Each structure stands twice: as structure tokens, then as C-alpha cells.
Image (cartoon, helix red, strand yellow):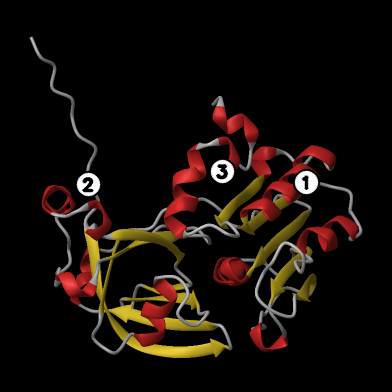
């Protein structure tokens, strides 16, 4: 006798249209999305809410929402829509819009060039957001760390901070032209770090700066996201040397230097792709 297992409920794909675009800094562009498809959007009340955007090759003429099971049978693997993970910078349930900030580096990557060339009415497709992190007032201090890729999530987290919170924010960008305004509580200090160009293992200052900063006593909640090897080093410092509880940390890699996105994603389940070694045996 065969036992039929109940399938997990499938979250509907949300299909929205570009309503507006705004250049925030030299390498950051914000797109606002909305339209009738917002009825399928299921919000999540956390600061770091992220979505996995589906990008299909324009020349294939595919129209979202995508029947992924059917496309998997019809298309060659290299033609299958690819996913890219992005933070929802802002959600306005009343206006029925979402905003996503994209890092732009010329024609590098997939999502950045798409965002740079997007026009009003272009469509975007993703599932409703996941995420867990929100600044918790029960902690004595808050430590937020990241590069450009984490700037949207950190900006969203700042907006959810109470005025009583204290801590430090370390943000590494190419230069002063990539800084954005952050309205932080009076007890929170923002430290902008300038590499002087695109990220390389030689010019990054993020880990070194965090290590050399004054360490304060008391419980600390950490939000740290960015380049993979940098995050590994920060994990070793914060969790291994400073003893920050793993449960008080939202720390992961958004990308890896020298790796294409698909290669980076494929390595997540291998030793080189693990930030916390114990995850391999979990």
C-alpha cells in the first residue's frame, strides 16, 4: 500500500510592475513596485525580509507567473529562470507597493543591470518574503555590519530601532559617493568605511575595523551580512573570540568574491560555503 504525503503549501508567485525608479547613490538604485499582483503579497513583520526574485531570459518570451515544473521539463538547464535574493527595503501596505534597492556595478551580474535598465511597467516575479531578524530591545547593544549588499537590510533595521537602543553600525562601501542618510537613534554610531574601489580581499577594511573597535560589556545582538570570507572571519571573532551567542546573531554571506552567483549558491552546502561549521553536521 502506498502512503500519500501531503505536499507543502505553495506560496503564490507575486507579479508586480515597476512604478518608479530613483538613483540613491553612485552604485545604488531603488525601484518601486506595485500593481494588481499585490493581492498575492503576504507580508512578514520583520526588519530583514527578503524575496527570491525570478529572472527569465528576455529572448525566451516567458510571462510570469512561471510554471516552474513545466518549464523544468521544457527548457534546457541554462534557460531555466534563475533566482536572486534581495531585501525588501520598504513595504507600504496601504499604497500596495514594495521598494527594493539594487547595487549597480555597470553590466556586472544579472539583477543590477536589469534594475538599471528597467522602465515603468516592467514586471518582476517573486514569492512572499522570508526573514527572521528585527532589532530586539532586550539586548544591551546592537552591532550591525555589512558592505553595499547589506545596506538595504541595515537601513530597514535602523528604521525599526527604538530611540533607547545603543550600538554601532559598520558599513563598507567604495567611497563617500556611496553613503546614504541613516537616521539612527542618538545612542547608535555609524562608521562608514571607504575601500577606494570595488571589493578585493586586499582593500577591504571591514573585519579589521570591527576587530580593532572597542568592545563593550553586556549582551549584544549582531546583524552581519556581506562577502563570504569576511563573514567567516567575523563569525570567528564575534562568536569564537567574543563569545556572542549564536542565537543572538544574524550572520551570513550574501555573495563570495571570485564566484558567480550560481556557483556561490551551489557552494552553500559544501564546507567552503559554510559560515558556521556546525551547520554541516546539524
Query: Mark 3 = which residue?
Result: 273
Tell me if residue 172 can be seen.
Answer: yes
Residue 84 appears left or right of 141: left
3D distance between C-alphas at marks 2 and 3: 28 Å
3D distance between C-alphas at marks 2 and 1: 37 Å
Q: Position of residue 68 (x, y in %)?
A: 18, 52
The single residue placed furthest to the left in the displayed view is 1
Q: Which label is found at residue 238?
A: 1
Q: Residue at x 78, y 63 (%)?
A: 167
Q: Position of residue 87 (x, y in %)?
A: 47, 65
Q: Position of residue 134 (x, y in %)?
A: 58, 56
Q: Reply above or below: 137 against 192.
A: above
N-term-proximal mark, 1 vs 3: 1
Query: Mark 2 = which residue?
Result: 10
Asked whether disc 2 touches disc 1, contact meaning CB atoms under 8 Å apart, the reply is no
N-term-proximal mark, 2 vs 3: 2
Amino acid at each position: 500500500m502506498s502512503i500519500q504525503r501531503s505536499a507543502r503549501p505553495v506560496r503564490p508567485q507575486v507579479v508586480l510592475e515597476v512604478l518608479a525608479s530613483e538613483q540613491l547613490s553612485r552604485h545604488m538604485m531603488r525601484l518601486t513596485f506595485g500593481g494588481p499582483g499585490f493581492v498575492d503579497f503576504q507580508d512578514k513583520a520583520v526588519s530583514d525580509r527578503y524575496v527570491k526574485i525570478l529572472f527569465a531570459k528576455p529572448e525566451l518570451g516567458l510571462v510570469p507567473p512561471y510554471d516552474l515544473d513545466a518549464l523544468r521539463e521544457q527548457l534546457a538547464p541554462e534557460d531555466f529562470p534563475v533566482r536572486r535574493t534581495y531585501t525588501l527595503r520598504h513595504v507600504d501596505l496601504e499604497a500596495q507597493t514594495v521598494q527594493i534597492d539594487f547595487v549597480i556595478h555597470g553590466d556586472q551580474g544579472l539583477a543590477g543591470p536589469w534594475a538599471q535598465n528597467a522602465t515603468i511597467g516592467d514586471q518582476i516575479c517573486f514569492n512572499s518574503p522570508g526573514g527572521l531578524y528585527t532589532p530586539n530591545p532586550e539586548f544591551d547593544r546592537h552591532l550591525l555590519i555589512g558592505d553595499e549588499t547589506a545596506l538595504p537590510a541595515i537601513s530597514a533595521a535602523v528604521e525599526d530601532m527604538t530611540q533607547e537602543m545603543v550600538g554601532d553600525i559598520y558599513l563598507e562601501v567604495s567611497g563617500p559617493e556611496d553613503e546614504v542618510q541613516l537616521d539612527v537613534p542618538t545612542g547608535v554610531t555609524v562608521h562608514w568605511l571607504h575601500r577606494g574601489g570595488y571589493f578585493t580581499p586586499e582593500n577591504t577594511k571591514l573585519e579589521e575595523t570591527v576587530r580593532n573597535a572597542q568592545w563593550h560589556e553586556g549582551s549584544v545582538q549582531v546583524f552581519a551580512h556581506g562577502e563570504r570570507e569576511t563573514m567567516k572571519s567575523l563569525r570567528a571573532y564575534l562568536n569564537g573570540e567574543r563569545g556572542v551567542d549564536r542565537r543572538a546573531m544574524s550572520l551570513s554571506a550574501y555573495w563570495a568574491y571570485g564566484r558567480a552567483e550560481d556557483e556561490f549558491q551551489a557552494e552553500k552546502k559544501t564546507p567552503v560555503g559554510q559560515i558556521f561549521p556546525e551547520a554541516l553536521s546539524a
